Amino acid sequence: MNNIILTGFMGCGKTSVGKRLASLLDIAFLDTDELIEKEEGKSISDIFASDGEKAFRNMETECIRRLLRQKKEPAVISVGGGLAVREENRRLLRELGTVVYLKVSPDTVYRRLKNDEKRPLLQGENPRGRIEDLMNARKECYEQGAEVVILADDKTFEEIMNEILSYCRRSEK
Ligand code: S3P
């Protein structure tokens, strides 16, 4: 079995779906943001504030490289919403496993994250507009980087997991 990698915009459900899927498959769940926080000993918000976004993006690339070097047992891996923007990262992710893009609308993201304080990119004024702009700028990257796109608005976790699993089964044949 391959690693299952979940990508998509902030708030698309990578962590919620990923944890449930990993538990269903009885495999590990990893999250690049958590791995980076552990490695750096500070939160994502602190990394953005003290080191800047560029440094964080380099940490993301290094994190994926480390995962590739480690070659552990298969896992479900949720990656930060901006990670797929770098072409190099998209290539590394495809090497790492089956890349699944959870696609949601800006409305869904706004509804889920309007009170969130942990995403530095959404803390300024007009988060609704920022979500739309960032999503427009990134959507091709998500699509290019993924093997399969799952429309995740208004679906239950079970429905999303079933779609992921049926894709993985088909592609293993
Ligand atoms: C980011 C998404 C976040 C986190 C950081 C930047 C982005 O991860 O990596 O705040 O650029 O979209 P989630 O997608 O898990 O929220």
Image: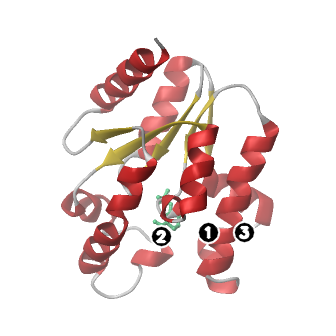
Asked whether the beta carbons under mark 3 and mark 1 sit within 8 Å of each other, the answer is no
Is residue 119 positioned above or below 48 on the image?
above
In depth, the one of 18 and 142 nearer the eye is: 142
Q: What residue type is labelled 3?
A: Lys
From this viewpoint, which residue is outermost toward the bottom? 125
What residue sits 47% from the left and 30% below the top?
Answer: 20
Mark 3, residues whose alpha carbon is within 10 Å: few (<14), some, or many (≥20)? few
Residue found 73% across the figure and 42% down from its top:
68
Residue under pointer 3? 42
Query: Ligand 1 within 8 A of label 2's CB?
Result: yes
Judged left or right of residue 122, residue 73 is right
Which label belongs to residue 119? Answer: 2
Compare marks 2 and 3 and give the one earlier in the sequence.
3
CB under 8 Å between callouts 2 and 3?
no
Callout 3: SS: loop
Q: Determine which of the numbered discs, if any, sits on residue 44 in the image.
A: 1
Report helix, strand or loop for mark 2: loop
